[in-house]
């Protein structure tokens, strides 16, 4: 049986109880203060001012042109991100630094045959113009571009997966069909990838992005590098080796791109890879044979269902020493722990039912983010995992920012269905219940079947598309 969705809660009591089970406190404000409260307070960082405490998380659409440039659908999404009124746009979406580093054939990417700048400039213009139209000004708007290499989850063409990995993984190799060492990236290849991060960052700076996010989360290359204990040589082994690729890229970008700020989105905790158990519920399949588990990052090897933040905090310390001032804290991976990475009422078609009340995983996000913020009060910390809260997003967001547990509340899926949510909260208006993301997961199911992402149930433009019916069928089949 599905646990009750927060949308059904008539008051805050059940939410408080569920969050307190992990956090020790209820994390819910009763009275919303709008712009006059913590969520409306500007924040200074690295010579910039973020005008309020909402961020739009990066959200890929699987809808770029095959040559790496944005399409009309991509521009529309970025415009809507601008219209949201959130003053921090963390990355827009994952932009691959090479064609073979794409996670899908339609991912935006640095293509050696195409000047990336006009496409990136068009996205930035669209976003800023949407923001200006909605808010009257772009003052306090801070926009970054997320740079990525998909590593193990590279799928650059319709021919299928083409994983490039940091190390042979005891559990995940079988899942991505990796049979021999050919997919393991050599040190020299990693150096070339690092150079491409710098090239992409330089293009972002030229067109006027305020910062780049060097993406180290969700199972992609720079996240996997942090777990590469089994890799010999300079980019593996101890924490200094495992973090060398990430820190080397950050250092190189800062050296080459004066004035461009660098942020990092980090999966600060993870969990042993899950899969669909015989009853359709997510389970850590094979955990006992792989304990102690040495192939994760931010998990306790002896009990890899529990966070261990020792190494993630040390990595954040290294990044701070390199001048990183903004960290976006996330958790898990959409491939191996979607229940943690994006808690949902309904799983995507390739997923599984949540192994526990999704609120426990929302609370895990809040908890880990609190611990990062407590360890690094001088950094701007962005939090994740709020969309599942639905009607209660503003209550929890205001609580966490108000108590100093997080600086900026990032929203992912809710920005596809209802970008104006941020403006409505700040203006003190009631939320539009018909547009709140209900975590149907159709925006994930679509891409899993080669279709573009979008909010098919709630965004009229996507609801009217022919793919919407196909996705509804897939959802029904999945139960
Ligand atoms: C359709 C879709 C696309 C996403 N694309 C990205 C991406 O490009 N980069 C990234 O770091 N996270 C991506 N994410 C993860 C979100 O940024 C966010 O972490 C996640 O949805 C949890 O936040 P939420 O509960 O507010 O949705 C994506 C998620 C979805 C559903
Ligand atoms: S499809 Fe729409 S309602 Fe469903 S999870 Fe995605 S954004 Fe939310």
Image (cartoon, rainbow, N blue to C red):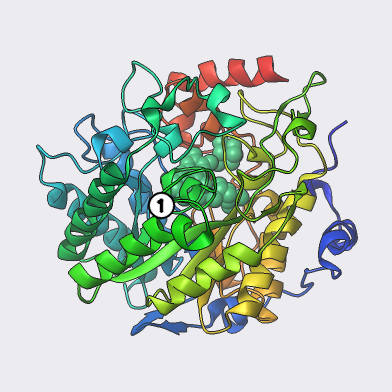
Relative to 217, is 349 above or below? above
Q: Quadrant where the N terminus lies?
A: top right
Residue at figure coordinates x 44%, y 63% from the top left: 264
Secondary structure beneath label 1: loop
Query: Callout 1: 10 Å neighbours few (<14), some, many (20+)?
Result: many
Q: Residue at x 75, y 58 (%)?
A: 363
Task: Using the image, determine if residue 210 lies above or below residue 177.
Answer: below
What residue is shown with label 1? 235
Q: Nearer the viewer, residue 176 or 80?
A: 176
Determine if the C-beta at disc 1 is less than 8 A from ligand 1: no
Q: Position of residue 285 (x, y in %)?
A: 74, 28
Nearest the viewer among 405 and 149 is: 149
Q: Is residue 342 left or right of residue 115?
A: right
* Residue 36, percent from left and from top: 59, 83
- Kindly identify the residue that appears in the image at 60 percent across and 17 percent down: 474
Q: Is residue 383 left or right of residue 449?
A: right
Image quarter of the C terminus: top right
Question: In front here: 204 or 251?
Answer: 251
Residue at screen point 28% across, 33% down: 100
Q: Is residue 59 visible?
A: no
Q: Position of residue 148 (x, y in %)?
A: 36, 48
């Amino acid at each position: 049986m599905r646990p009750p969705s927060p949308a059904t809660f008539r008051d805050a009591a059940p939410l408080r109880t569920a969050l307190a089970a992990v956090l020790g406190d209820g994390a819910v404000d009763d009275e919303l203060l709008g712009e006059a409260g913590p969520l409306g307070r500007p924040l200074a960082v690295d010579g910039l001012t973020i005008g309020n405490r909402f961020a739009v998380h990066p959200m890929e659409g699987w809808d770029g042109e095959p040559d790496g440039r944005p399409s009309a659908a991509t521009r529309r999404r970025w415009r809507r991100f601008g219209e949201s009124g959130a003053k921090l746009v963390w990355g827009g979406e994952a932009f691959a630094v090479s064609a073979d580093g794409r996670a899908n054939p339609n991912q935006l990417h640095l293509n050696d045959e195409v000047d990336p700048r006009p496409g990136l400039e068009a996205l930035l213009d669209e976003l800023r113009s949407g923001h200006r139209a909605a808010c009257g000004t772009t003052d306090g708007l801070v926009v970054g571009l997320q740079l990525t290499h998909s590593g193990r989850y590279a799928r650059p063409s319709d021919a299928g997966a083409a994983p490039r990995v940091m190390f042979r993984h005891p559990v995940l190799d079988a899942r991505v069909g990796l049979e021999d060492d050919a997919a393991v990236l050599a040190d020299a290849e990693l150096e070339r990838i690092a150079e491409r991060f710098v090239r992409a960052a330089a293009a972002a700076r030229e067109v006027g992005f305020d910062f780049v996010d060097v993406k180290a989360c969700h199972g992609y290359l720079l996240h996997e590098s942090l777990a590469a204990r089994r890799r010999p040589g300079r980019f593996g082994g101890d924490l200094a080796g495992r973090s060398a690729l990430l820190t080397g890229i950050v250092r190189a970008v800062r050296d080459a791109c004066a004035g461009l700020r660098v942020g990092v989105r980090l999966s600060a905790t993870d969990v042993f890879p899950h899969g669909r158990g015989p009853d359709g519920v997510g389970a850590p399949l094979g955990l006992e044979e792989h304990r102690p588990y040495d192939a994760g990052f931010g998990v306790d090897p002896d009990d890899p269902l529990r966070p261990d933040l020792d190494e993630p905090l040390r990595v954040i310390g290294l990044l701070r020493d390199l001048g990183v001032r903004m960290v976006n804290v996330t958790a898990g991976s959409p491939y191996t722990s979607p229940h943690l990475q994006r808690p949902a009422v309904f799983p995507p078609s390739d997923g599984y039912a949540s192994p526990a009340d999704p609120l426990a995983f929302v609370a895990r996000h809040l908890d880990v983010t609190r611990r990062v913020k407590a360890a690094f009060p001088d950094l701007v910390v962005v939090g994740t995992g709020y969309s599942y809260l639905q009607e209660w997003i503003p209550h929890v967001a205001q609580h966490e920012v108000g108590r100093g547990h997080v600086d900026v509340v990032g929203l992912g899926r809710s920005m596809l269905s209802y970008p104006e949510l941020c403006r409505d909260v700040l203006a003190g208006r009631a939320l539009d219940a018909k547009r709140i993301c209900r975590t149907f997961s159709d925006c994930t199911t679509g891409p899993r079947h080669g279709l573009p992402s979008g909010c098919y149930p709630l965004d009229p433009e996507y609801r009217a598309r022919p793919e919407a019916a196909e996705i509804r069928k897939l959802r029904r089949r999945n139960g």
